[in-house]
Amino acid sequence: MTFSRNPDSDKATSHEREYLEMAFSPSSGPLRSRWRNNGLSADFLGDYVATFMPSNDGGAVLEKQQSRIKHAVAYIANELLENAMKYHQRDVDIPVRIDLELTGDHITVSVSNGASQSQAQNYAKFVEQLRAGDASELFLQQQEKSAKCDEAEVSCVGLLTMIIDYDALMDWRFEVHPVQRESMIVTTSAVLLLDNILGASA
Amino acid sequence: MKNIQGESFEVRLEPDNSTVLFKGALRLSGTEDYAPILNMLKETLINPAAPIVLDLRELNFLNSSGITMLSRFVIEARDRSGIYLMFLASEAVPWHARSLKNLQRLMPSLSISLS
């Protein structure tokens, strides 16, 4: 785990950044026993970010805003980690990494994992669909599909809810692993604009 | 009274078979793990009261697999006639107001009471 911050300031401004990085070895235990760690790590990231948000002098409104930010980061980190743990390539030793970056006006949560070429292609196809379509409509379609088919594990609802419910701006990177050339590193990033979260009417 | 408990959550079907109470943080890993909770919810549809109430006020966290589980229940309730479904939600829990609205789009008659 790595922490980095400007020691002279108690609050991030647009010129300063806070970082936090964590890496997991996803093949070191069965999925079920690792699952609990997703929630723990995500809650930790939420709490970590909240430390830098304006509230210590604060009234109820600021506390509510702090709670929104904390929840948004915890939700997004949890969903990205769940996806990475579910879909990472099991037979290669590529860690799942989560990076948090906080600036004066936005928070970025990025998660990367190793994937086979075919898994990466399937994900890239969904990403294309997401970029071309309307997230709210896709969400409704996925939920109707899920209700009709008991077996189906509906994919990517987590990504859709990040966009719809938290106004997250999403970006994706697909790179060939520098050493294990048959594997890809897939990175999903969610950017939360602080004005959007703090200004949310809900 | 029926009860499903995990390390971080509790879901309880009240003796009237029409109110289901959720507490804590639900982050189960997918359809299979959510099946017992979905089945408990579906018990309210056997002799449906008016309204069927899902009390979510103390459910602080629900992952997207849990949202899908709620969607499945909402769609099943919608597709039967004469079901009156109500969610009790809290303004103090950040995800309630934003995420529950999406379920209303699946079932426009779904009533959400935010307090």
Image (cartoon, coloured by chain):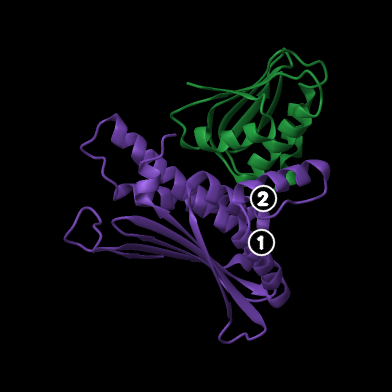
Chain colours: A purple, B green
Q: Quadrant of the C terminus of chain A?
A: top left
Q: Quadrant of residue B86?
A: top right
Q: Amino acid at mark 2?
A: Leu
Q: Amino acid at mark 1?
A: Gln
Q: Which mark sits nearer the N-terminus, 2 or 1?
A: 1
Within 10 Å of disc 1 (Cα), the crowding (few <14, some 14-19, many 20+) is: few
Within 10 Å of disc 2 (Cα), the crowding (few <14, some 14-19, many 20+) is: some
Which residue in the protein does label 2 denote? A138
Q: Position of residue A75 (x, y in %)?
A: 51, 47
Chain letter belonging to callout 2: A
In depth, the one of B83 and A136 nearer the eye is A136
Residue at 31 percent across and 48 percent down: it is A51
Residue at 40 percent across and 45 percent down: it is A197
Residue at 74 percent across and 37 percent down: it is B72
Left/right placement of residue A40 relative to residue B11 reads left
Q: Position of residue A110 (x, y in %)?
A: 48, 63
> Is residue A146 shown above or below A64?
below
Chain letter belonging to callout 1: A
Residue at 68 percent across and 59 percent down: it is A30
In depth, the one of A142 and A100 nearer the eye is A142
Q: Quadrant of residue B5?
A: top right
Is residue A183 among the parts visible in the rendering?
yes
Q: Secondary structure at mark 1?
A: helix
Furthest toward the left, the residue is A8
> Is residue A132 shown above or below A54?
below
Which residue in the protein does label 1 denote? A129
Q: Position of residue B24 (x, y in %)?
A: 54, 33
Q: Secondary structure at mark 2?
A: helix
